[in-house]
């Protein structure tokens, strides 16, 4: 069975439940025969669907919801403890010449956010984490200011929020930034 203490110690639990995988090979297929029959690529090139493809100096933006909320629910309870920092790896911070608590401009071709840096080496280089802090009226910005609202028909008519790239630079008052 599943033991909570073992889960916390190991980080995962191997399930002994056997189940049938309903594919022609009876295995998990990352390359799908059904997709091939429909003429769909196995791994679509997402770069042709997003407008701001990453360059070496760009960061992949991770915009996650707070652990104790459900998207924008409970903002009236937690708004006094919002974490408005953008988290980056220490090597990225060094490359950018920023330190813990520095004001930075996070921007791309969609918009910009001014916030503070926090250093977290659990993030890989090139990734930046910014929590979704409810609405602009609550936090002073919305992470949606950095994302496209373009609908991608090839992805089932969905948007590509999690394919957003941003630049980060030290914020200088009256530097021309909005």
Image (spheres, rainbow, N blue to C red):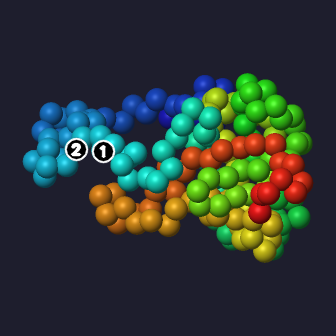
Tell me: 119 left or right of 66.
right
Q: Are marks 1 and 2 in contact (CB under 8 Å)?
A: yes
The residue that disc 1 covers is 44
Residue 41 image label = 2
Which of the 4 image quarters holds residue 20? Answer: top left
Relative to 45, does residue 74 appear above or below in the rendering?
below
Which of the 4 image quarters holds residue 26? Answer: top left
Tell me: 148 left or right of 28.
right
Camera-nearest residue between 165 and 123? 165
Residue 20 visible in the shown view: no
Residue at 40%, 45% (x, y): give it.
Answer: 47
Which element carries disc 2, helix, strand or loop?
loop
Which element carries disc 1, helix, strand or loop?
loop
Tell me: 18 left or right of 82.
left
- Say few, some or many: other residues with alpha carbon within 10 Å of mark 1 (under 14 / 14 to 19 / 20 or more): few
Relative to 58, does residue 158 appear above or below in the rendering?
below
Give how far across and how far down residue 126 sits, in percent: 62, 33
């Amino acid at each position: 069975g599943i033991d909570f203490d073992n889960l916390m110690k190991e980080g995962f639990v191997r399930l002994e439940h056997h189940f049938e995988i309903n594919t022609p090979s009876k295995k998990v297929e990352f390359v799908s025969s059904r997709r091939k029959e429909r003429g769909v690529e196995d791994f679509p090139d997402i770069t042709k669907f997003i407008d701001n493809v990453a360059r070496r100096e760009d960061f992949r933006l991770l915009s996650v919801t707070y652990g104790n909320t459900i998207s924008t629910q409970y903002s009236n309870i937690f708004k006094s403890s919002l974490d408005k920092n953008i988290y980056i790896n220490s090597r990225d911070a060094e490359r950018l010449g920023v330190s813990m608590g520095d004001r930075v401009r996070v921007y791309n071709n969609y918009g910009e956010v001014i916030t503070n840096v926090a250093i977290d080496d659990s993030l890989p280089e090139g990734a930046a984490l910014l929590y979704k802090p409810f609405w602009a009226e609550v936090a002073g910005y919305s992470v949606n200011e950095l994302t496209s609202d373009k609908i991608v028909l090839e992805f089932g008519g969905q948007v590509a929020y999690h394919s957003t790239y941003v630049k980060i630079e030290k914020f200088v008052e009256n530097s021309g930034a909005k």
